[in-house]
Image (cartoon, rainbow, N blue to C red):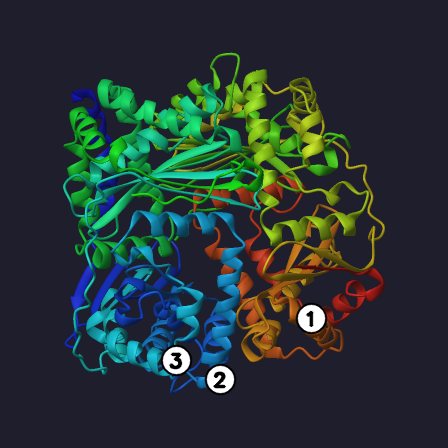
Amino acid sequence: MSKSNSSFASDLRLLETFWKLPPERAVLANGLTLLVQRDTSASVASVQVWVKTGSIHEGGLLGGGLSHYLEHLLFKGTERRAGREISTTVQAHGGNINAYTTFDRTVYYIDLPSAHVGVALDVLADAVLHSTLPADEVAREKDVILREIAMGNDDPDHRLGEALFDTAFRQHPYRYPVIGYKDVFTAVTRDDLLAYYRARYVPNNLVVVVAGDVDPEAVRVQVEAHFGSAPRAKLAPVLVLPEPPQLAPRALHRYEDVELTRAGLSWQIPGLTHPDAPVLDLLAVLLGQGDSSVLWQALREKARLVHSIDATSWNPGETGLFYISFVCEPGNREAATAAVRHELDRVAAKGFTAGQIRKALRQLVVGEINTRKTMSGQASRLGAAEVVAGDIDFAKAYFARLARVKATDLRRVLRAYLGAGRVTAVSLNPKTAQPATSTIVVTDRVPDSFVEQTLPNGARLLLRPDRRLPNLHLRLLCEGGPVHEPAGLRGATSLLATLLTKDTKKRSAAEVAKFIEEVGGSFYPFSGNNSFGLAAEVLPGDATRAIEALADAVLTPAFKRASFEVERDAQLADLQQDADDVVTVGKKLVRRKFFGAHPFGIDSHGTIEGLTALKPADLAALWKRLGVAGNVVLVAAGDFDPKVLGPKLKAFLSKLPRGAAPKRAAVFTKPGEVGDFIEKQPREQAVVFQAFPGPGLLADDYYIGEVADELFSGMSSRLFERVREEKGLAYFVRSSRVTGIDVGMFMFYAGTAPATASEVLTEIDAEIARVQAGRVDATELVRCQTRLKAGRRMGLQTNGARAMHAGLNTLYGLPVDDAATYDAHIDAVTIADLKAFARRYFQKKLRTQLVMKP
């Protein structure tokens, strides 16, 4: 372990930047805790209010979902503001407002330009401390949450998660779903909510976190102004029953309408502050995080028993679960479970190699760096340290504890906690896999622009150094996707991208994964409607390794049959999982009807028939056609010296074969199937869709489409206000787009009850008619423009996001750095433009309407 500790000590020095810039912590006279982290790298801030109450604190109404219910209602009106004014105010200042509830906390947050932090603090203080919980909103949100519960019941992963917690915990309130049980939730009254709100939403139970380009003293003054007048209140402790030790195995196996088996194995483990917690985190990384992890290699790559597998150490409070989950074919569940046990016993006896431990430690360091890429991430990390761990220096202490972990510690905790006699096994299986006599059994500021260079062979290189974070991102992009795939081999581009990250002539797939993951790096594919490629992200000192991995993948891919079959099966499994989600099924069906014979009728994941017909030679041929210099853009963003890295990247790119970008032969003239369609599915909820033509990326009215999409979406859109807030007809309602380079589809969709599907469609029609009549308010337009511009800036905080954006722009012939031009295009959109846009595209004779219902 000495070599591992030495290497880890070097990695820890990369985190010293964070430890040297500690947050400022203050406690107001009324007991409220304030944390401020100043970061001037971008004019963005995240303002968060952490309420130290969640579903485990609901006392006599455990299982009623009070915390989640209250979260829904806090933006519905205060003593000073009507509900709509809250989201409108935030969006008018370029911000996003949202919230989430979990077992032990409820968090309300606003991300916005840092100049408007005062607005965010005012809005959040008003909502958290002065909400009125209007009776009509209480009733309306109850209907909305009932639909959310129904949507959860339609999600197999959600059902499996609830089964796991209900089986693994017998006494601790973790066993109750955060959203609550339907029957218990239905009985909750406004008086129940008011009592819970008044008892738990008090200053001495709040933590305010602000991270971004702010003046800490000014923030403190603003927090005093907005939160300081609320008096300290009595805060009675809530009894949280401890979980007794599990003394025997437990199991729950369900057989339902699903395509694949989802399974999990869990063990009780101690909480976050226990000395063994870091060791268990490290063990989870070693066993099941990454393509080179022990279980991934043993069960997926070698034994071919699972499509995916991972391991997690979850321990937010005094107790938790070590959880290994996998997806497999129904007939492989028992063999996969046995194989997991075999691997656990093997490493318990033989231990891990020094190289494996170094890799896992590096992954944890990289993970810590990645959480701090955005202001929102920094604020969340800080809030968790204060609220969950109870110490804002938790991260520093945690990594100091990790530095002392020995190989023998890993074997010790594995033996102590992951024993065969205390496992909880749960699974969700297809009905066809159920034994004939089986029943369910339960037993015991930012650098300058990208510099663009074009090489003699036509390849393009973009460089953007940024030294503020020890992180380097390399991304290689090619035009590709449905338009460039053979008609009978749909999904080839996505599979091609995946195979490029696997075997090369120099390394096997397992060796490639180890090569990049042993330094804490990541190497992964991406693909979409118009492009595909590879990305590598590493610490700055590992740049050469990242280039080597990328170059080997691009220049000498092997397309070995064994890896091909594994990855094709995994992509097929993803398609099967899609069939379990009614929204995804509906999106795919309406897309196919709308685009008809055009390649965009099938998304980039392809079809079962197309993937089944594929052969390794098909991928090699596709890569030969698309992987040419004129179709390649390589982007480097992050901590590097252009004089050092630039020549290395050019040397790599110069080896690409010459060739021009492929031509796009497919032409879209009109929708394939127009009219009204009904598709019946065995689900509790209905989902409605309306699809119309829309502009492509290069169209003159593309930016009008951007504003239109924003106009119909979001919490403060008229459509959302009318359908969900006023009438309570749907849990979600919004617009969306499928955008090609020169073709597009503009879609509206909503999740509702079967009985109200027609009414929701009528409301969508009415909203379209309003825009077609030019009855958009000037304030609506300004809100949309402000949000789009602020969203663009907030979406480009990370090196990976900036590299992707610049690379795609270059690939499509758009300006590399389009921030200024983007804002100008968005600001140029008028109400008259939106009216003309809606009249041009949203015509009933061009509409494909689909209703998915039971």
Q: Is residue 753 visible?
A: yes
Q: Is residue 319 above or below residue 502?
A: below
The furthest residue to the top: 506
Q: Is residue 456 above or below residue 111?
A: above
SS state under label 1: helix
Depth check: 417 or 104 in front? Answer: 417
Percent across and percent down for residue 297 are: 41, 23
SS state under label 2: helix
The residue beneath circle 2 is: 136
Tell me which label, 2 or 1, sits earlier in the chain: 2
| Amino acid identity at mark 2 | Asp
From the viewer's perspective, is the residue at label 2 or at label 1 nearer? 2
Q: Report the side of 671 relative to 49 (left or right).
A: right
Percent across and percent down for residue 656 are: 61, 20
| Residue at the (55%, 72%) spot, across then down | 783
Which of the labelled discs sits on residue 764, or is there none? Answer: 1
Percent across and percent down for residue 577 are: 57, 42
| Amino acid identity at mark 3 | Thr
Q: Report the side of 824 relative to 523 (left or right).
A: right
| Residue at the (27%, 31%) spot, across then down | 420
| Residue at the (49%, 28%) spot, across then down | 332
